[in-house]
Image (cartoon, grey):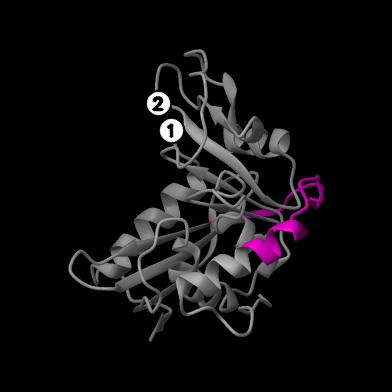
Amino acid sequence: MEIRLSDPWPTTATEAVAMQQRLRHRIRAVDDVTTPLRTVAGVDVAYAADSNRLAAAVVVLDHDTLEVVETSTVVTTAMFPYEPGLFAFRELPALVTALQQLRTTPDLIVCDGHGLAHPRRFGLACHLGLLADVPTFGVAKNVHVGEFVPPASRRGAWSPLLLDDEVVGAVVRTRDGVKPVFVSIGHRLSLDTARDHTLTLCTRYRLPETTRHADQLCREVLAGRVNPTVAE
């Protein structure tokens, strides 16, 4: 897959915030998705408890069967400091390396994190979507910014996530009576479509199958139970 980091890549929080503010206006919150979808990828990162060592995983699934088509993993050391709202700058170098190893260019990418639901409206899903030029959205386990009214308890119920009176995401119930997830667009996708994809990918569990596969794989690689595709 063809993708590369912006050059130069920020090394300080000041540089990172400036990049987010510069790039956020390029986000397109409109549907621009290949129809029908053939493949969908999940991306996730796991961190070692006692160091800056991390493992990044990309898992490509067949959109219809949700069977694994291809995987790619990287084990490396995070070079960017831990800063709330700037996790993308710790995680994207490894994720980009993992994506570069793919033979398949996914039609859609799902991030374990936020997109527009971010203090500067430019979370990981937005940044990755711009870099990859692939429709991208985020599904997060917890709220990062914004306010909401809890949706009804049935699967499919949702409510808007608001930040400064602007809708930046959707709070979606993916299973009856289970804690909702927080969906926000990254790039080249509308919120309605991102919400629909979330429900399609959540077949049996609270989280999308893309996230479940990527989460498990990066943890296995970090623990040394699976060999990484790339070790840096």
Numbered mark located on residue 86 in the image: none
Dot 1 falls on a residue whose secondary structure is loop
Q: Quadrant of residue 218?
A: bottom left
Q: Residues within 10 Å of mark 2 (few under 14, many from 20)?
A: some
Q: Is residue 195 left or right of residue 113?
A: right
- Above or below — where is 116 with respect to 39? above
At x 51%, y 28%, the residue is 147
Residue 36 painted magenta: yes
* Span highlighted in magenta in the image: 21-42
Looking at the rendered structure, the number of numbered marks drawn on it comes to 2
- In the rendered image, the residue lying farthest to the left is 50
Q: Amino acid at mark 1?
A: Arg
Q: Quadrant of the N terminus?
A: bottom right
Q: Give me the C-alpha separation between circle 1 and circle 2.
A: 8 Å
Q: Which residue is mark 1?
A: 206
Which residue lies at the image location 49% right of the left edge and 40% below the top edge? 145
| Precedes in sequence: disc 1 or disc 2 | 2
Q: Which mark is residue 179?
A: 2
Numbered disc 2: secondary structure: loop
Residues packed near mark 1 inside 10 Å, few (<14), some (14 to 19) or many (20 plus): many
Nearer-the-camera pick, 149 or 36: 149
Residue 101 appears at what percent x and percent y?
Answer: 56, 78
Q: Amino acid at mark 2?
A: Lys
Query: Residue 148 vs residue 222: left or right?
Result: right
Q: Are marks 1 and 2 in contact (CB under 8 Å)?
A: yes
The one of 86 and 187 positioned closer to us in this rendering: 86
Given residues 164 and 28, the one toward you in this image is: 164
Q: Is residue 105 visible?
A: no
Indicate the position of residue 102 as horizontal and vertical percent values.
59, 74
Place of residue 139 in the rendered image (x, y in percent of width and height, measured from the top left)? 52, 43
